[in-house]
Image (cartoon, helix red, strand yellow):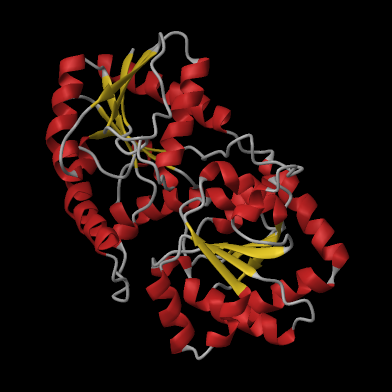
Amino acid sequence: MKIGIEAQRIFRKNKHGMDYVVLQELLELQKMDTVNEYFVFVKPGEDHCLSDSFNMHVILVDCPSYPLWEQYALPRIARQTGVDILHCTSNTAPIFCNIPLILTLHDIIFLEPRDKTNKSLYQNMGWLYRRLVVPRILKKCKRIITVSDFELHNILNKLQLPPTQLAMIYNGYNEWFKPLDDKHEVYKKYIDQKGFFFFLGNTDPKKNTERTLVAYARYLEQSAVKRPLLMADLEKQYFDGILSRHHIEHIRQHIVTPGYIVNSDLPYIYNAAFAFLYTSLRESFGIPLLEAMACGTPVITSNTSSMPEIGSKNAILVNPESVEEITAMMLRLEQDSTFYAHQREVGLGRAKLFSWRKTAEQLQQLYLDVYHENKK
């Protein structure tokens, strides 16, 4: 087979969730598949994280905007390379494309009510683009991949697609997320001392940053230790607004906000952390949850959407809309050493069930199935 894979944004420096997913899938397919030929379509960028090999060809496709790149440049170059199937990996695909399509639909948040407090132009434009494009491409897709049973059933219920059109393939996590001895004290690039709470937040309301900060303020009121909070990838104006709105400006001295943390440093951050707060309102999968567990770091996560499925029923599951529950679990981890040790073991055991190798093997089989179906 000649397989085309859209990986538009993997060469950008500051990658995010979907970028890492397709990159790791590609790296695994490159290592394991010696039979098929892959053509990876990428927008030029400064982080050349994938190289050509005998079975994988990286094709740079330059175009000024995401919509033009996907709707015009991508199907044009895919036709020129003669691929048998085209896998679009980031929720959207070309509307006009005569090549058999596979779509990874990570979630359908774009169809759910929009939180009007989200002021991010980038996120709002992405939401609008998906809302316009996805309904027009779904019936054209030979297969739609999603990343959890929660999201699979969500898509089936809301979009009324044939169950045979959908496939569920779990994400994995990188092998360097494991218990580590940080000999070079990498974590000190971001925070002075070990034993902090760690939170990956941004301005998207689904990340539940506001309630998590309020819960942390209440933790500080009741804790004798008063651990600092490291919050990555958070805009200062948004952060200041939350503190002012809830009259908790006094907690600022306990919070470190270093901005974006590069992925290669994250294993050291998780290992240095006392616990990881993954208190999102909604996730289709939740790779950071697995990463922290694989490092042996206890995680406080939510009892909503995919998080109980990925974290398991033995994880620390809280109602993310309850500030009191988040605070209570922060304090319990701090005060109950037996509970803390148990949660560490729960995470280490759970993470072993997931890997990018398993993901790539299932992808390879799906490509084969679609290829043969199309030849009939």
Q: Nearer the viewer, residue 54 or 304?
A: 54
Residue under the point 64% across and 65% down = 317
Residue under the point 77% across and 43% down = 181
Locate the C terminus and report the quarter of the image it occupies.
Answer: top left
Residue under the point 74% across and 49% down = 296
**Residue 166 sits in which quadrant?**
top left
Residue under the point 51% across and 46% down = 262
- Residue 90 shown left or right of residue 343 in the figure: left
Q: Nearer the viewer, residue 54 or 233?
A: 233
> Does residue 96 appear in this view?
no
> Does residue 235 appear in this view?
yes
Residue 204 x, y percent position in the rendering: 39, 66
Q: Nearer the viewer, residue 295 or 141?
A: 295
Residue 127 x, y percent position in the rendering: 26, 58
Q: Decide: is 174 above or below 117.
A: above
Q: Residue furthest bottom?
A: 247
